[in-house]
Image (cartoon, rainbow, N blue to C red):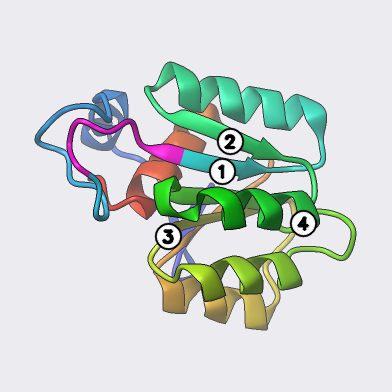
Amino acid sequence: MLEKGGQASVPSMSDMEKVAKSPGDPSRRRRGRPSDDTPTVLVVDDEPHLLRLLSSTFEKSGYRVLAARDGPGAVAEFERKHATIDAVFLDVGIPPAGIGCALERMLAIRRDVGLVLMSGDDLHEGLRATLDAHGGHFVRKPFARANALRALRLAMGER
């Protein structure tokens, strides 16, 4: 299930066709990125199998993937490579203390980065407000790969 602004969204057939479209297609627009650059996503999750699944899904769809397993690792990677990262796909329950400090630090460095949060639980009010204010997207676990990919593309300004 993919949510934005508290509403559930079920992809239509035309949405699924858009998901299948390559991110390298020159008709696609990405935030501040030349059309010939490979879009980059930072995936953050402490569950190794989910980190591998998302990384593989995004790489097979034409994205460059950077990965981190916790908040401090995500912030360190983002600080080093923030200029080349188009989106962050972030688990709400990452160690050591959840998403709060890591998300705050990354958005302080670069507010225009695409944002997707994922969790098996509802987002608390403050986190939902941050996500909505940033124009980000939420993916509820468990999710289909197509929904994760769709959320990533929407967060990056691709339609």
Which of the two labelled residues, at mark 4 and mark 3, occupies the earlier sequence position? 4
Left or right side of 103 for 19: left
Q: CA distance from mark 1 to mark 3?
A: 10 Å
Which of the two labelled residues, at mark 3 and mark 2, occupies the earlier sequence position? 2
Q: Residue furthest top?
A: 60
- Residue named by callout 1: 42
Q: CA distance from mark 2 to mark 1?
A: 5 Å
Crowd class of label 3 (few under 14; some 14 to 19; many from 20; radius 10 Å) = many
Which residues lie in the magenta part?
Answer: 34-40
Badge 2 amino acid: Leu
Q: CA distance from mark 4 to mark 2?
A: 14 Å
Badge 4 amino acid: Gly
Which of the two labelled residues, at mark 4 and mark 1, occupies the earlier sequence position? 1
- Residue named by callout 2: 66
Crowd class of label 1 (few under 14; some 14 to 19; many from 20; radius 10 Å) = many
Left or right side of 98 for 19: left
- Residue named by callout 4: 71
Instruction: Check whether the beta carbons of the residues at disc 1 and disc 3 lie within 8 A of each other.
Output: no
Query: What residue is shown at x 26% (from left), y 24% (from top)?
Result: 22
Q: Is residue 88 visible?
A: yes
In depth, the one of 82 and 46 nearer the eye is 82
What x and y, as percent, mark residue 123?
67, 68
Query: What residue is shown at x 52% (from left), y 48% (from top)?
Result: 81
What x and y, as percent, mark residue 59?
48, 22
Left or right side of 156 for 123: right
In depth, the one of 119 and 65 nearer the eye is 65
Q: Is residue 41 above or below residue 36?
A: below
Q: Residue furthest front?
A: 80
- Residue named by callout 3: 113
Which of the two labelled residues, at mark 2 and mark 1, occupies the earlier sequence position? 1
Residue 90 in magenta stretch: no
